[in-house]
Amino acid sequence: MGSAISLIKISGHYLDDDVLLRQFAAAVARRVEQLVIVHGGGIEITRMQERLDIEPRYVDGLRITDAQSLALVEMVLCGSVNKRLVRHLLNAGVDAQGLSGVDRGLIRARQMEHESVDMQFTGSVKTVRGEVLFQQLDLGVTPVIAPVSAGTDSNFNLNADPVSGALAAAIGADSVVFISNVSGVLAENEVVERLSELEARALIANGTIYGGMIPKVETALDVLSSGVPKAIITDLDGWACDVGTTFVH
């Protein structure tokens, strides 16, 4: 594998908007590095739960997935969201293939542990078969991954952020890029180009990083702790111009 590899985690902000998906697919088509794409789809899952009178349940910001909801998650993430994203990529000239963590045992999962709540079918990463992705990349294929993964007696619903870090570590990715609707970490209305973990923690402590940006930054730092050299928070325009906030060791 001579070429650089980036893992791209695309946020739900893009996934049900055809205009944004077309722009994302066009941006992917212009990249020269090898890409692996991971997506979630929590907004559409919640919408479908409400339509079927299944009450969404959360603890510490994580969805508790019961048996009914697992079937729905598989349908939404592995079905409609994944195939919609792949279709847009194909139309932009990207040779893309949709996968879930279940396919070829790409991701093996276990039930997520929580000290006070039974997380049921919400899982965490146990192992990753990195060679599955290397084989795709060697063929010039861009894998597009839904984070539903295989357990022993059932599948599990995994959060796409830790899945991104685990996959990136398994394939020795050069970076993980979180593409969302924010351009990066802001300080005095300017994007902070580069942060170490210590600097990021200091900005959280003094209130510069606050609100919804805190979990984004924590996720980027988790990626660094998994062994990936750098993590980037940016939006689609920023990714196209290689700007945003880069977190480094």
Image (tube, grey):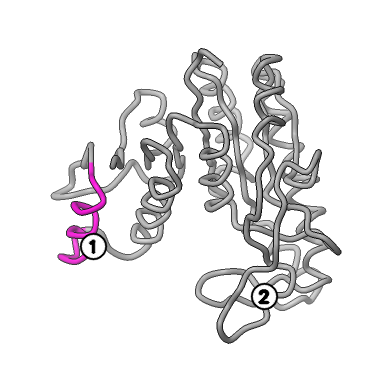
| Kind of residue at badge 2 | Met
Tell me the quarter of the image containing the N terminus: top right
Asked which quadrant contains residue 120, the reply is bottom right
Q: Is disc 1 surrounded by few (<14), some (14 to 19) or many (20+) residues within 10 Å?
A: some
Q: Quadrant of residue 36?
A: top right
User: Can you identify the residue that label 2 sits on?
Assistant: 119
Image quarter where the C terminus lies is top left
- Across and down, in percent, residue 170 comes to 57, 38
N-term mark: 1 or 2? 2
Q: Nearer the viewer, residue 126 or 196?
A: 126
Element under disc 2:
loop
Assess whether residue 152 is covered by the magenta stretch: no
Magenta residues?
Answer: 195-208
* Disc 1 element: helix
Q: Residue 172: horizontal and vertical position, in percent?
A: 50, 32
The amino acid type, in three-letter code, at marker 1 is Ile
> Which residue does the image show at 25% across and 59% down from the upper left?
209
Is 61 left, or right, of 73 in this rendering?
A: left
Q: Which mark is residue 204?
A: 1
The residue at the point 43 percent across, 45 percent down is 181
Eyeballing the image, is 222 above or below 68?
Answer: above
